[in-house]
Image: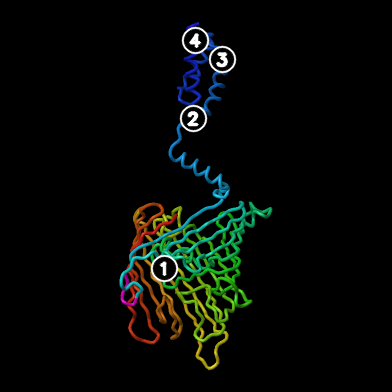
Amino acid sequence: MCRKLAASVVVFGMVFLSSFAFASDDSELILKILIKKGVIAQTEVDDMRAEIAKEKPKVAAEAPKTMEDRVASTEKDLLSKVGLDKVSSKLKLKGRFAAGYFSSQRAGTYFNNSFRVPEAKLQFAFQPDDINSVIMRMNFNDALANAPLLDYLYLDTNVMKLTPWEKSPFTLMSRIGRVKVDFGEETWSNNMVEGALPSSSASNVAGNDVGLQLSGRVGKDNPVGWTVGITNGNNSTTVDNNWLKAFNTKLSYNIIDPLSLSMSYYNSGQLGAASSAISIGGVAAPPTNALDWMRQIVEVDARYDFKKGKVLNPPAYCDSLAYIRLAYGYFYDDAIRFNLGRNVRDREGNYGFVEGLYNLNKKFYTAARAGYVGLNGDNTAAFNSITTNLYERYSLGFGYRLTNATIVKASYDINLEKKGTGGEDPTDNLLSIILASQF
């Protein structure tokens, strides 16, 4: 009897250990020998295994929780009590932040040298279902509640999920509300956090507007990307001032794996005396004395990645060995109607830039950019707050990735202006040293 009891204890221990995958491969063989010798029956072994299986959840439940588990449990209970447990799982928060030290020459903004918080954005995404998402981004640049406070607010819809062709080689997304106009490539990284350098190019073509944008891809292996949009066209955040709407379209394609190309077109429609939603080098106002005008822009972009990585954008977080990208654009501001007896001329010009980044290692990179924006003839405009016929910017800098999200950046911008009325070139070169992070 004692022998059988001792054997039972041994068997119980072996079964217990084997159930947690800690026993040796010989445990099953020993059990078979004991059963064969009549020390214990197969039914007894099966009963003990069943009993252990029942006890395992209780043991796990009684195990002490870590501090993280207790915090998560408390948070879940609190959200449940106020009815936000389901909402929190559908609400996502992201943002970016940049602050640093800026020093410019006499004609620049930071002649007295300044610390500044130039970039602070918070984005909320609420997904009520697997088809729609509401996106809202708030602007706290310079640590202020800016007006308008919302950069954009729109509804994204995966249209293909509403059709029988969801698994086809075609995708279709709709975006309605106040949106970033999908024109060119720089517009998606023209900020101090995501850009390779703290500054943008001299032209920096970008803008937000209210309207509808459709986008998608055609094909599976190497798809063609496309965007078509209809927006108000003016820079008002409320209503349009003309029944003719703005139109934008874009096509993108990878010619070969490391080389991507895109072409964009924008037509503002008639704007009256209002400013355009899309600015070029900071210029969005109508030509002088124009009572009605229209802006058209065409841009071609190309990018080549050397030893292409997994992360291409944003540029500051690119893990390719290096990349080089360039853009060239043409614009025409047509003064349709103007004050009689007053001098008014159409504005016509072009712009472009070339930018490169080289990763010395996973942490440290260098970057450079050269770009310009100018007008044909002797016309002038306030490009980047300097009244000039031609504005050029040459930037050189580096970045050090402290973490996967936070980067220290420094750059020096050389700004050259050709003044249409003659005179000296304003001295407005800029040194920037910033700490940038995204979350």
Tell me which residue sits at (43%, 39%) in the image: 67
Q: Residue furthest right?
A: 164
User: Mark 4 vs mark 2: which is more N-terminal?
Assistant: 4
Depth check, mark 3 against mark 2: the one in front is: 2
Looking at the rendered structure, the kind of residue marked 3 is: Glu
Q: Magenta stretch?
A: 102-107
Mark on residue 44?
3
- Rounded to the nearest angstrom, the CA distance separating label 4 from label 3 is 12 Å
Q: Residue furthest bottom?
A: 341
Question: Alpha-carbon neighbours of circle 1 within 10 Å: few (<14), some, or many (≥20)?
Answer: many
Determine contact: label 1, label 3, CB under 8 Å: no
Looking at the rendered structure, the kind of residue marked 4 is: Leu
Q: In front: 52, or 250? A: 52
Check if residue 389 falls in the magenta segment: no
Looking at the rendered structure, the kind of residue marked 1 is: Ser
Mark on residue 200?
1
Tell me which residue sits at (50%, 64%) in the image: 261
Depth check, mark 1 against mark 3: the one in front is: 3
Residue 86 percent coordinates (x, y): 58, 47
User: Mark 1 vs mark 3: which is more N-terminal?
Assistant: 3
